[in-house]
Image (spheres, rainbow, N blue to C red):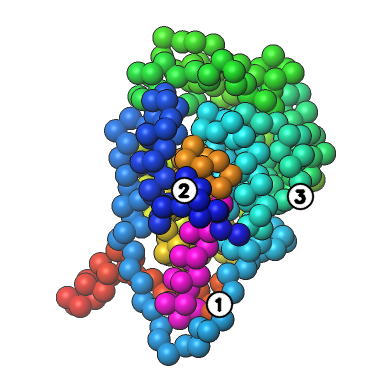
Amino acid sequence: MAASSSSASSSVTNISEFQSLAREKLPKQAYDYYASGAEDQWTLAENRNAFERIRFRPRILIDVSSVDTTTSVLGHRISMPIMLAPTAFQRMAHAEGELATARAAAKFDTAMVLSSWATSSVEEVASVGPGLRFFQLYVYKDRQVVEQLVRRAERAGFKAIALTVDTPRLGRREADIKNRFVLPPHLTLKNFEGLNLGSMDKSQESGLSSYVAGQIDRSLSWKDIAWLKSITSLPILVKGVITAEDAEISIEYGAAGIIVSNHGARQLDYVSATICALEEVVKAARGRVPVFLDGGVRRGTDVLKALALGAAGVFVGRPVPFALAVDGQAGVEKLLGILRDEFELALALAGCTKVADIKRCHVETEEDRLRKALVARL
């Protein structure tokens, strides 16, 4: 399943390398859009830094001659608890964009989430062949547009709706403001193309920010989850939860799952890293629905840490357009292959032979160490 040894990504040994390679290939406006976070970008850095503060407590002398990375998500079996998050405008990175990503995800037998703001439509993505796909949904002011989009996702064989709830307004992304970001003229928001909502106008600041201000419903509230459930039988994942309080309410309103996400640190700066918010949300969920992590995952060891803290799986976002920019479908395949191999190795070295073996005792967080230090002083 690995990418060809002669491909542009053949020299990549860890997925973070895709970013520096992509920077050399992409136009500045496209690279900055993918790479940047909100305001001071503190949370952007913290999404990674927080993983580094978690330590492993591996177990030894366990037979790991056979390690199984498979798991299930919403009743669907996948090859590993590593899935592809919704990232917009993928054709800015590569001509095949989301189609290449969909093929790579299917080849590795894992799930892909298609962005509402994809540059390929739900029908185009479905046309590449079978695969487990979810649809990420922004709620527009015109609810008929939303309903139509959900129906199209259903007909295209998508298996869940990932409802983004942290974007009533777009975060202040200063790189996009400086660049006056707008989609390149040859690209459109394909899912909205026939609704006269597929393009964004140039602006004195960010064209995307102006588009969101004009189209996205700022009045979105909990009652709208009930409305969404009334128009679709697909399970709804609430994406953008980082507190126990909102996890509890999400479940009360019928969420089938929760995605702990801070929107790639692109919305409110100085919120917690998602790996730091994860355990709080997991404890609030109390096993009633699966909880997934989105944000900062760059290593197989990150996946192991997230699962030890209670995640049912993780979503990988930014590295996908970077891998696309470097080597198209082969780049995304290389990304998935590296993460799968790293995760399998991390499982074995931690003394686990399958995903179900991963326990809370396999990790020690910064809070755990502080607690131990306090107890030692008593």
Judge by depth and name the residue closer to the eye, 122 or 267: 122
Rendered location of residue 319, percent (x, y): 46, 45
User: Please, what is the three-letter code of the amino acid marked with disc 3?
Assistant: Pro
Q: Is residue 361 left or right of residue 186?
A: left
Quarter occupied by the C terminus:
bottom left
From this view, report whether residue 329 is shown above or below residue 152: below
> What residue appears at the point 62 percent right and 34 percent down from the top-left corner?
96
Q: Is residue 11 left or right of residue 182?
A: left
Near mark 1 (Cα within 10 A), the count class, few <14, some 14-19 or many ≥20, is: some
Q: Are marks 2 and 1 in contact (CB under 8 Å)?
A: no
> What residue appears at the point 39 percent right and 41 percent down from the top-left corner?
21
Inter-mark Cα distance, 2 to 3? 25 Å
> What residue appears at the point 42 percent right and 32 percent down from the top-left corner?
25
Magenta span contains residue 337? yes
Q: What residue did someone put label 1 on?
A: 67
Magenta span contains residue 366? no
User: SS for tag 2?
Assistant: loop
Question: Which circle marks residue 141 in the picture?
Answer: none
User: Please, what is the three-letter code of the amino acid marked with disc 1?
Assistant: Val
Is residue 371 visible in the rendered image? The answer is: yes
From this view, report whether residue 186 is shown above or below residue 7: above
Q: Is residue 332 left or right of residue 178?
A: right
Which range is magenta? 333-352
Q: What residue did someone put label 3 on?
A: 130
Q: What residue did someone put label 2 on?
A: 9
From this view, report whether residue 306 is shown above or below residue 240: below
User: In terms of sequence position, does the residue under pointer 2 or pointer 3 come before the other?
Assistant: 2
